[in-house]
Amino acid sequence: MEILHVTAECYPVAKAGGLGDVAGALPKYLNQLGHIAKVVMPMYRTKFLYNNQWEVVHKGYTNLGNRGFEFTVIREATNILGFDLYLVDINGLLDREKVYGYDDDTERFTAFQIAVLDWISAWQHKPDVIHVHDHHTALIPFMLRFSYKYGVLKNIPTVLTIHNAQYQGWMDWSNSHYLPRWDMWKWGMLDWKDNINPLASGIKCANVVTTVSPNYLQELKYMSNGLEALFEYEKGKCVGILNGIDLDVWDPSTDTYLSDRFSLKDAEAGKAKNKMELCDRFQLSFEKPLIVFIGRLVGEKGAEILPGTIHDSFVHVGRRMNYFILGSGFPEVENNLNGLKYLSEQDYNVYIGYNETLSHLMYAGADFLIMPSRVEPCGLNQLYAMRYGTIPMVRRTGGLKDTVIDYGDPGGYGICFNDVTVGDATHAVWRAVELYRNKKKMQELRQQMMQLDFGWETSVKQYVSVYSRIV
Ligand code: ADP
C-alpha cells in the first residue's frame, strides 16, 4: 500500500512534541514492512532544511480565498530518514522558525493543506491512503470529498490520527471562503457549535479516526474540550492505537546524544555516569534521588502543581531528593519555577526552554520522571524514561494508564497517583524517596522496565490493518 502522511511536525525536521516523534517513526516502520509511506509537511526554516540536499518536484499556483499564492514542493534527495520526505514552501506563510504560535496559523495551515491537495491532484498514481494528523491537517478529508476542485481525489480513503484533541483549530465562519469552492449543502460537515472546527470536521469526514492510546479514546467521550458528543456518535469508526517508540533514536546503548551510553548489562554504572554529568552541570547532589520533569509547562501537563509539589516535599518529606525541570510554557509557571531557585541547596534547578540533547541526558541520568498530567493522549516521556531505566511517576490518565503499572501491583514497575494535586504528587515523591533507599528493588525495577517492549512493531501492524480495512 502507498500511504501519504500529511503533518505539521516530523522529527528530526521539526518537532514541538509527540506528534513529531510519531510522524518521524511510523512511516519508517511502515516502509520496513514493505509498504510505501511518504511524508509531506510545511517547509519551516529549520536546521534540517539547511543541512540536507533537496530537489524540486513540483511548482504550483493556487488560492487561499481571494489571495493567490505560489508554492513549491521539494523532496529530500538521499532518503536519509528511511522514507520520502516532501516539504511545501509557501513564501511568507510557512517559512518561519517555529512550527506554531503565530497569529496567522489558520491561514498558514489552511494554505498548506490546499497546496498539498493541489499537488496530489497532479500525481499520476494516487496514494492508496491519505493519513492526516491533528487539526492542522484535518480539513483534508472534507476538501477531498466536497471541494469540486478535488473530484479526482474523492475516492482516496483518509485516516485522521488524534494526537491531542485539546486544540481543534477553530475558525470563524467568515473564513469559509478559504476552502476551495465546496458543496454548500455540506456545511454541517465543517461546523461544530457555530464555528468551523477542523478537528471535528476531520472526525466526521475521515474514514477512520485513531487516537494514540486506547484509554485516551475512552476518555474523549467524556472529556474532549467540547467534542464529547461527537466522539460518542462516531465511536464506530474510532480505534485507539498505542504509540511506539523509535528504537533507532531512543536506545541508551546507541543514543548519539549521550557521551556515556549503556545497556541492560551496565545500566547501573551507565546511569550513574549520566547522573554525575547532570549533577555537575546543574549543581545538584549526586547522592540523592533525582526526580525530573520534561515537557510543556501547561495545564494539560499539570505543570502548575510542580512548584507547590517541590516546595511541599522539601518541607514534609525533607530535603532527601533532587529536582531538575526542563520545559517552557505558561510564563507564570516558568516564573514560579525560576523563583524556587532561591530555595535550592544543591537539590533543585530548572532549564527553561527546549533542548533535545539535554532531554536525552535527563532520561539517561535521572532516577525518576514525574508526569502529573491532566490529559495525556499517549505520553512518550514515560516510555523513553522506562527504556533508559528511569522510573516513571505518573498520574493515572490517558496513555499513562495504558503503559505504567504501579510497583505495588502485581508485575508493576512505576509509581502511580490519582489526582493532579500537590498532595497526591507529594505523596508520590515520598514513595519514590523510600523506594530509592532499597537499592536492590531499584535495580530490579530498572532491569524489568528496560526490557519492556514498547517498540513500533505491534502498533504499525495495527495501522496496517486499519488501512487494509478501508482500501
Ligand atoms: P506532547 O503533549 O508535548 O506532545 P508527548 O509526551 O507526546 O507530549 O511528547 C513529548 C516529546 O517532546 C518527548 O519526545 C519529549 O522528550 C519532548 N519534549 C517536550 N518538551 C521538551 C523540552 N523542553 N526539551 C526537549 N524535549 C522536549
Image: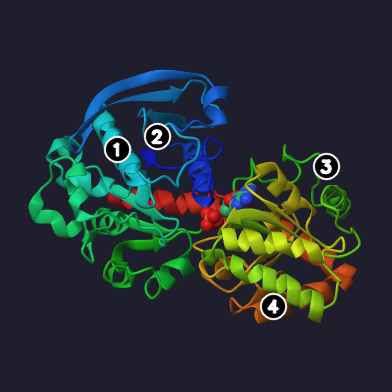
How packed mark 1 is, by other alpha carbons closer than 10 Å (few <14, some 14-19, many 20 or more), is many
The circle drawn on residue 410 is 4
The circle drawn on residue 111 is 1
Q: Earlier in the sequence, mark 2 or mark 4?
A: 2
Of discs 3 and 1, which sits in the foreground? 1
Of discs 2 and 4, which sits in the foreground? 2
- Can you see residue 69? yes
Q: Earlier in the sequence, mark 3 or mark 1?
A: 1
Residue drawn where x is 33% and y is 72% of the image? 228
In whole angstroms, how far apart are the C-alphas of marks 2 and 3?
38 Å
Query: The disc labelled 2 sits on which kind of residue?
Result: Leu
**Residue 394 located left or right of residue 40:** right
Query: The disc labelled 3 sits on which kind of residue?
Result: Asp
- Does mark 1 have its CB less than 8 Å from ligand 1? no
Q: Earlier in the sequence, mark 2 or mark 3?
A: 2
**In the displayed structure, would residue 441 be above or below residue 118?**
below
Query: The disc labelled 4 sits on which kind of residue?
Result: Pro
Q: Which residue is mark 3?
A: 260
Q: Earlier in the sequence, mark 3 or mark 4?
A: 3
